[in-house]
Amino acid sequence: AAPGPAPRPVDEQLDGIVVPGYVDVHSHGGGGASFVTEDPEEARRVLATHRRHGVTTMVASLVTGTTEALKRQVATLADLVEAGELAGIHLEGPWLALKYKGAHPPLLLSDPHPEAVAELLDAGRGTVRMVTIAPERNGALESIRLMTARGVMAAIGHTDADYDTSLAAIEA
């Protein structure tokens, strides 16, 4: 038999459709598991579920909790960010408006005192990428400036802020 054609280079051997992976910047969990955990294996179950469906890059979103619980959760997820398994951490709460709390526990919502904000950011060791905050809360503008100085995106959300307050937050 005559020899066949020379094998194609690996980068030409694709058979099927190739698309970029999905990027998810706001996910609390999946596959029966949650990012709201102190167990890295649970967080990995979330990642595995999303990866099976084409998500290659994820930011883990946490929900409102006590400062102590959030610090432990952030520290757990920070390890996964540092290992390259997650792209970052998103804090959705506890600095949200009661009126627009959504599924967040109302008794745990609080004003963003800059000291508490700094504690959570410190627990993340530079891995907190985004924080959802209601800018009308006491201490919010100072906290937004602190977040921004540390390279964290302050996202206005779950808010009852008026135009001027929102503008001040954007300027901060």
Image (cartoon, rainbow, N blue to C red):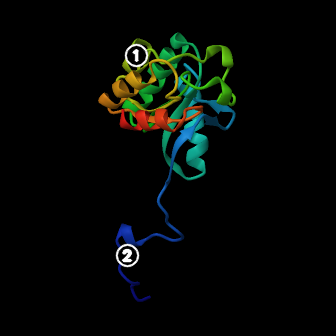
Q: Residue at x 60, y 34 (%)?
A: 28
Looking at the image, can residue 126 be seen?
no
Is label 1 in contact with label 2 (beta carbons under 8 Å)? no
Q: Judge by depth and name the residue closer to the eye, 102 or 86.
A: 102
Quarter residue 120 falls in: top left
Up-down relation of residue 45 to residue 51 (above or below): above
- Within 10 Å of disc 2 (Cα), the crowding (few <14, some 14-19, many 20+) is few
Q: Amino acid at mark 1?
A: Pro
Q: Residue furthest front?
A: 164
Q: Is residue 102 left or right of residue 47?
A: right
Quadrant where the C terminus sits is top left
Image coordinates for residue 167, horizontal then vertical, percent: 44, 38
Quadrant where the N terminus sits is bottom left
Q: Is residue 103 left or right of residue 126?
A: right
Up-down relation of residue 106 to residue 17 (above or below): above
Q: Residue at label 1?
A: 114
Label 1 secondary element: helix
Q: Judge by depth and name the residue closer to the eye, 118 or 24.
A: 118
Image coordinates for residue 101, horizontal then vertical, percent: 66, 27
Quarter residue 82 falls in: top left
Q: Residue at x 43, y 71 (%)?
A: 13
Q: Is residue 70 left or right of residue 29?
A: left
Up-down relation of residue 72 to residue 30 (above or below): above
